[in-house]
């Protein structure tokens, strides 16, 4: 009498176990291929990126061995204007090191509140600064300052995650300070930016030094020089030099080859 009942119980148990295993498998597959919640565009099928479980500050998307960090939201705008940046990041020295000519056309990509845009603009009185960001709130902050101070050589550009939306063959120097590690589509961004550079045009990346554990910044907000060079080389930008005069950051210069 009890035997068929036991058999039925056993079959039910096996069934439940099999379903549970299938469920786990499906979840694992999703974790490794689905775009992270931070991706606002459609699923990526390029094969350039790998997907993983997001770490605390990351989006779970890996590019050339590096997990991409979350974007700093516009609510952190005040932090970008903090006084301690003067000593920690020496913005004056950064701008001097860009070696700009008065007529240069500069792109500040991931401009945020314009901390660098408004320091660069007076150095290119006969040129222009394109201040690019994907967050409209950041552009609003910059627009208010442009209006208040009647600045006439800054153009605001709302880029997309894949494209800085700059005109082709125009930019002499593109600057990215504490921004590149946040790009959700670094390959697409840099491929498009390369098209916007003039032949011989430079790209300057300022990123916290990953090699230095004493730099008190979250790991995904830092980049090693080797990683930056590898990623720039992948889009046909040639390394020119790395300056390590800043207390915490690399200043890395790459360029589009001359025509
Ligand atoms: C940490 S903030 C740095 C802002 C500024 N460069 C500075 O040093 O004060 C990074 C900025 O990059 C922007 N950003 C992230 N991904 C971007 C993309 N694909 N294109 C343009 N801007 C982007 C963010 O919206 C944010 O304002």
Image (spheres, rainbow, N blue to C red):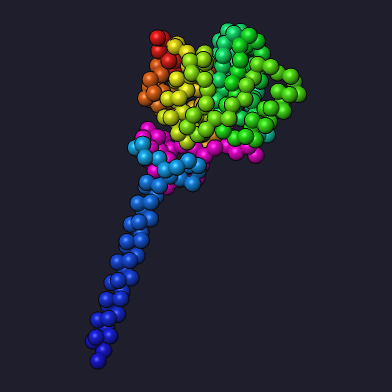
Q: Position of residue 5 (x, y in %)?
A: 28, 85
Q: Where on the picture, by quarter, is residue 149?
A: top right
Q: Quadrant of the N terminus?
A: bottom left
Q: Which sits in the foreground, 112 or 158? A: 158
Q: Which sits in the foreground, 211 or 206? A: 206
Q: Where is residue 162 in the image (x, y as percent from the top left)?
A: 47, 32
The residue located at (45%, 20%) in the rendering is 195
Position of residue 138 in the picture relative to residue 150 (left or right): left
Q: Is residue 201 magenta?
A: no
Q: Where 132 falls versus 24 (above or below)? A: above
Q: Which range is magenta?
A: 48-76
Position of residue 8 in the picture relative to residue 137 (left or right): left
Q: Where on the picture, by quarter, is residue 246?
A: top right
Can you see residue 71?
yes
Q: Position of residue 160 (x, y in %)?
A: 52, 33
The residue located at (65%, 10%) in the rendering is 125
The residue located at (27%, 83%) in the rendering is 6
Instruction: Count the marks.
Output: 0
Q: In which quarter of the image is the C terminus?
A: top left
Q: Position of residue 203 (x, y in %)?
A: 49, 18
């Amino acid at each position: 009498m009890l035997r068929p009942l036991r058999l039925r119980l056993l079959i039910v148990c096996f069934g439940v176990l099999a379903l549970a295993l299938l469920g786990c498998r499906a979840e694992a597959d999703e974790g490794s291929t689905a775009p992270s919640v931070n991706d606002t565009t459609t699923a990526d099928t390029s094969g350039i990126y790998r997907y993983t479980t997001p770490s605390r500050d990351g989006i779970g998307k890996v590019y050339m061995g590096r997990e991409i960090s979350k974007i700093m939201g516009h609510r952190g705008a005040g932090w970008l204007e903090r006084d301690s940046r003067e000593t920690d990041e020496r913005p004056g020295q950064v701008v001097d090191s860009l070696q700009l000519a008065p007529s240069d056309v500069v792109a500040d990509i991931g401009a945020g509140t314009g901390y660098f845009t408004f320091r660069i603009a007076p150095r290119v009185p006969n040129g222009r600064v394109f201040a690019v960001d994907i967050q409209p709130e950041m552009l609003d902050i910059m627009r208010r300052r442009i209006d208040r101070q009647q600045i006439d050589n800054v153009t605001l550009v709302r880029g997309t995650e894949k494209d800085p939306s700059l005109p082709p063959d125009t930019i002499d120097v593109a600057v990215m300070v504490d921004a590149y590690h946040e790009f959700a589509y670094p390959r697409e961004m840099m491929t498009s930016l390369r098209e916007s550079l003039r032949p011989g045009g430079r790209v300057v990346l300022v990123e916290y030094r990953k090699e230095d554990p004493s730099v008190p910044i979250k790991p995904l907000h830092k980049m090693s020089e080797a990683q930056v060079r590898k990623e720039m080389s992948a889009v046909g930008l040639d390394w020119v030099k790395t300056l390590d005069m800043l207390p915490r950051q690399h200043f890395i210069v790459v360029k589009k080859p001359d025509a």
